[in-house]
Image (tube, rainbow, N blue to C red):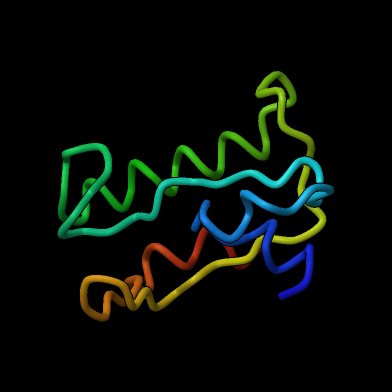
Amino acid sequence: MTHGALSVTGNLFPKEAVDGMMPEVQFMPYPNQYRCPLGIGGEAGVKALTYYFDNLINDVESGVRKPAAVILEAVQGEGGATQLRQSGCNVFVK
């Protein structure tokens, strides 16, 4: 696995023995309507997390530079297949 691929994976175990990961890789909570990291759930949770993402990259005071790319895992496979709803994808397609 390359340093770039390791840098963008959320799994910490393969990263432990490797130095020199890509700098400034940011991870965002996944807008899952069933297992919402905010505890809201449903469409309201998806809206809250997409709003959070949009503000983070567009607010000049957020402390995060505009990204060169956004890597979105639209279908997550751990713990069962979870597909991101279309409303959750719209904020990333700008």
Q: Residue furthest front?
A: 17
Q: Is residue 24 left or right of residue 58?
A: right
Which image quarter is the N terminus in? bottom right
Quadrant of the image occupied by residue 2: bottom right
Observer-nearest residue: 54 or 72?
72
Observer-nearest residue: 17 or 74?
17
Observer-nearest residue: 3 or 17?
17
What's the residue at 46%, 37% (across, down)? 52
Quadrant of the image occupied by residue 14: bottom right
Q: Residue furthest top?
A: 61
* Residue 76 image point, x, y percent: 37, 74
What's the residue at 78%, 63% (across, down)? 3
Q: Is residue 54 left or right of residue 79?
A: right
Which image quarter is the C terminus in? bottom right
* Residue 83 image point, x, y percent: 32, 77
* Residue 7 image point, x, y percent: 69, 56
Q: Is residue 35 above or below residue 87?
A: above
What's the residue at 63%, 65% (across, down)? 71
Q: Is residue 36 above or below residue 39?
A: below
Q: Is residue 64 left or right of residue 49?
A: right
What is the count of numbered marks?
A: 0
What's the residue at 49%, 71% (across, down)? 73
